[in-house]
Amino acid sequence: MSAARYLGIDGHVGRTPLIRLRRYSEETGCEILGKAEWMNPGGSVKDRAALGIITDAESKGLLRRGATIVEGTAGNTGIGLTFVGQARGYHSVIVIPDTQSPEKISLLRTLGAEVITVPAKPYSDPGNYNHVASRLASEKGWFWANQFDNIANSHAHYQTTGPEIWEQTGGNVSAFVASVGTGGTLAGTSGYLKERNPAVAAVCPDPYGAAMWSWFTHGHTEIQDGDSFAEGIGQCRVTKNLENVVVDRAYRIPDQEALTVTHQLLREEGLFLGLSSGINIAGALRFARERGPGQCVVTILCDSGAKYQSKIFNPEWLAAHNLYTS
C-alpha cells in the first residue's frame, strides 16, 4: 500500500465547495451557487492569486528562501501572501490604504507581516498604495507581487477556479459572476469556462465609484460617479489581468442592495459574508431574473464577514452612513 501524501498549508488552497443559496434559487427558479472562498486557509479568494504569484515567481527564479515580498493591497491578497510566504520561507511587507477595515490591518500584523498604512489615493497619484509598494521593491530589492498587472493572478484562476466550477456543476454552469478588484478572478475563471462552453456568460457586478461597468458596457472608464464601502473591489483602470477578458453583461450595484443580500443570507441561511460577496450575489440575482428560470449561475463568496464587523455589521456605523440591514 502506497504511503499517503500529506501537504503543508500552502497545499490546501482551492477545492472550495459550491453553496446553494436557497432563498434566491427558489425565488428565481435558477440554481444560484456561491463558491465558498472563505474556506481557503487565509480566508479569502485572494489565497489563489497569492499562491499563483509566488509559485510563478519561484519558477522564474525571482524568489528564493529568505526573500521579502512586498505588495499594495486592500488586505486579502496581503493575508494570502503572508501565510503562503511564511509556509515557503518568505517575509511579507504589506502596503494598505488606511480606509480598510481595522480587522484586516490587525490580522496582517498578527500573521507576521510588516504593515505600512498609507492615505487612500487614486491610482494617478504617486502616493497610491500600489506605487508605494513598487517603489519599495525597487529601493530595497524586494519582490513586488504586483497583483493587478501580474497575469500569474488570472492564470491561477484559469488553472483552479474555472476547472473546479466546471467539475462541480457537471459542466452545466450558465454564467459566472464576479466583481473586479484586480480582474484576475473574473478573467481567469470565465476564460476557462468559455473555452469549455462559449455560451457561458461572464458577468461583472460593479460597485458605484468604479469604472468597470462603464468599460464593459460603453468601452471607456469615464463613468465613476458615486462611492462604495466595499473593500478589495472597485477598479477604475483596465489592468493587465483584464486586457483580454470577454464580459457579456455588467451591472452597477449600490451598497444598499448588496447589504440587504448580505444580511438576509446571515439571518436566513447562516452565511456570514463581506460586502463584496453581497455585490457578487446581487449581480447573480439580476442576471438570473433577466434571463429567466433554469439557469445555473455561479458566483464568488469572497470572504467572511468577520473582517467587517466594525462596519457593515455594526448598527451604529450603518446608521451613521444611512444604510440599513433589510
Image (cartoon, grey):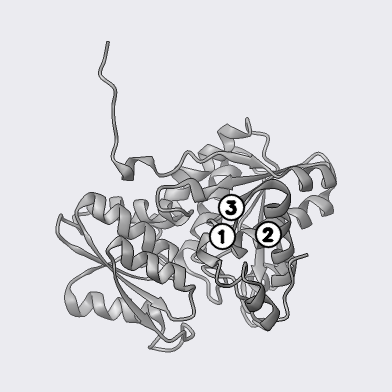
- The answer to whether residue 266 is visible is yes
Q: Residue furthest top?
A: 1
The image shows residue 32, relative to residue 78, as above or below, that is: above
Q: Could you tell whether 230 is left or right of 42 in the image?
A: right
| Residue kind at label 2, given as amino acid type | Thr
Relative image position of residue 181 (x, y in whole percent): 52, 66
Q: Quadrant of the N terminus?
A: top left
Left or right position of 244 against 145: right
Q: Which residue is mark 1?
A: 305
Reading the chain from its start, which is encountered first: label 3 or label 2? 2
Viewer-nearest of discs 3 and 1: 1
- Give the residue type at disc 3: Leu
Q: CA distance from mark 2 to mark 1?
A: 9 Å
Q: Quadrant of the C terminus?
A: bottom right
**Does residue 150 appear to the left or right of 321 in the view shown?**
left
Residue for badge 3? 301
Give the residue at x 73% y 66%. Answer: 325
State the separation of the CA atoms marked 3 and 1. 10 Å
Label 2 belongs to which residue? Answer: 262
Task: Tell me residue 249's x, y (percent).
Answer: 71, 59
